[in-house]
Image: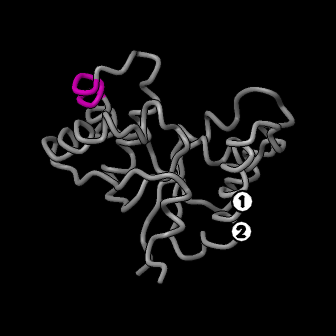
Amino acid sequence: MRPTVYVETSVISYLAARPSAQLVTAANQQVTFEFWELHRSRFDLYVSLAVVDECSAGDREVAARRVAMLEGLPVLDVSADVDSLAQALLASTGLPRGAEVDLIHISVAAVNRLDYLVTWNCRHIANPALRGRIEETCRACGHAPPLICTPVELIEVDQP
């Protein structure tokens, strides 16, 4: 059985964006393309309705590219259990109200028992200062937390 991965919106955005002139962003885009083209077949990938909504927003042309990237990926619901866990995470992490969709991503992955959540959102999701509280809250609510990582880290999973 392949590991399961929740693909957060920032990964799709990096795939659909024009190449960046900023060195770090361009490098992250390149790693994201490498993950998508060479390594994603090693995993079962999932998104949620929240990812679909975020990918559909904004500039029509770019949104169309993002939505096209989602084709064929199973879409998980944002259930009452997801909402409940997201509210608990909001209380425990101290993130601002505008970050609620980021907590939905974490909650969808946890409630659906996915192994990993892959993201480039290092402010609210893959933030080392928040990981402990995120994991503790997930467990306190009866859910195993996903391992939150960037595409760079996910590429290394099960590699010799």
> How packed is label 2: few (under 14 Cα within 10 Å), some, or many (20 or more)?
few
Expressed as whole percent of the image width and height from the top left, the position of residue 139 reads 16, 47
Expressed as whole percent of the image width and height from the top left, the position of residue 40 reads 60, 69
- At x 84%, y 42%, the residue is 18
Q: Main secondary structure of the magenta part?
A: helix
Q: Residue 33, labelled with which disc?
A: 1
- The answer to whether residue 113 is left or right of residue 30 is left
Outermost residue, top side: 97
The residue under label 2 is 37
In the image, residue 29 above or below residue 125? below
**For residue 31, what is the image quadrant?**
bottom right
* Amino acid under disc 2: Glu
In the image, residue 26 above or below residue 43? above
- At x 45%, y 45%, the residue is 77
Q: Nearer the viewer, residue 36 or 58?
A: 36
Residue bounds of the magenta highlight: 87-93
As for residue 92 lying within the magenta part, the answer is yes
Expressed as whole percent of the image width and height from the top left, the position of residue 66 reads 73, 45
Q: Secondary structure at mark 1?
A: helix
As for residue 22 lying within the magenta part, the answer is no
